[in-house]
Amino acid sequence: MLQIDIISVMPELIRSPLEHSILKRGKDKGLININVIDLRQYGLGKNKQVDDYQFGGGAGMVMRIEPIYNCIKDLKEKRDYNEVIFLTPDGEIFEQKTANKLSLCTNLILLCGHYKGIDERIREHLITREISIGDFVLTGGELPAVILADAICRLVPGVISDEESALSDSFQDDLLAPPLYTRPSEFEGWKVPDILLSGNFKEITKWREEKAEERTISKRPDLNFN
């Protein structure tokens, strides 16, 4: 089973997406478990403070080290983790290959940044990997954490009933998916390619490979699939 523990100061932003669709089915099957921890449980003082002004001045609050340290310490007392991942705009860009590798793990921590950022000592001493979902800034790391969880968990064997479907998604083998069609075979004069109706699966596979390469060259020439 894959265990993912998500640490957040805004857990309400995360819980709903995790209780539906493929993630819910994977949880119901006992193949994955996603636990959302409210960092304020580890906050300081009666107000459960998790942030403070930054040394040296400047705009924006910074997440304090003590709540995060204590939370991760508690989690590590229960199990060993393959990775402690910080969701941050300046991390490595998340790709399908990364999702594939992380789906082979058994225990992951996802730390959601918030406010201006986190105390640098957390990154230096507690984090093993930093990941970004793109070159833009969000209010916090909660939505990226959900994206990672979805992309990773759907690859765990058995979560998706048709495992071949996951393996043929876009970006597997650095290719975009080929064009897809379903019934009716003709609508408003728009026809499905004859090859897909031929029943010749060898030729259909060849056609799909060719179309996947054409689409990748046209839409994402930056991908190196050769």
Image (cartoon, rainbow, N blue to C red):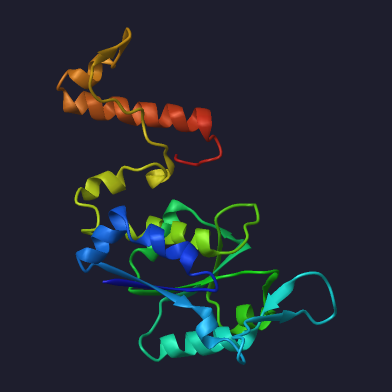
Asked if residue 100 can be seen in this view, the reply is no
Q: Position of residue 26 (x, y in %)?
A: 25, 61
91 vs 189, left or right, is: right
Examine the image and state in which quarter residue 210 appears. top left
* Relative vertical location of residue 192 with respect to residue 144 in this rendering, above or below: above
Image quadrant for the C terminus?
A: top left
The front one of 210 and 71 is 71
In the displayed orientation, state which residue is furthest to the front.
Answer: 46
Image-quadrant location for residue 149: bottom left
Q: Position of residue 171 (x, y in %)?
A: 42, 44
Quarter of the image for residue 124 reads: bottom right
Relative height, residue 137 to residue 130 (above, below): above
Judge from the rendering whether residue 7 lies leftward or rightward of residue 77; answer left or right: right
Q: Nearer the viewer, residue 199 or 118?
A: 118
Q: Image point 45% across, 63% down: which residue?
A: 14
Residue at x-position 65% and y-position 52%: 136
Say whether residue 139 is visible. Answer: yes
Q: Nearer the viewer, residue 107 or 12?
A: 12
Report the front residue among 168 and 40. Answer: 40
Return the x and y of residue 56 as percentages of the image width and height: 85, 80
Say how many tags the image has: 0
Picture coordinates of residue 60, whole percent (x, y): 76, 70
Task: Give me the residue at 43% from left, 52% from top.
Answer: 96
Vertically, is 50 above or below 186?
below
**Left or right: 30 in relation to 23:** left
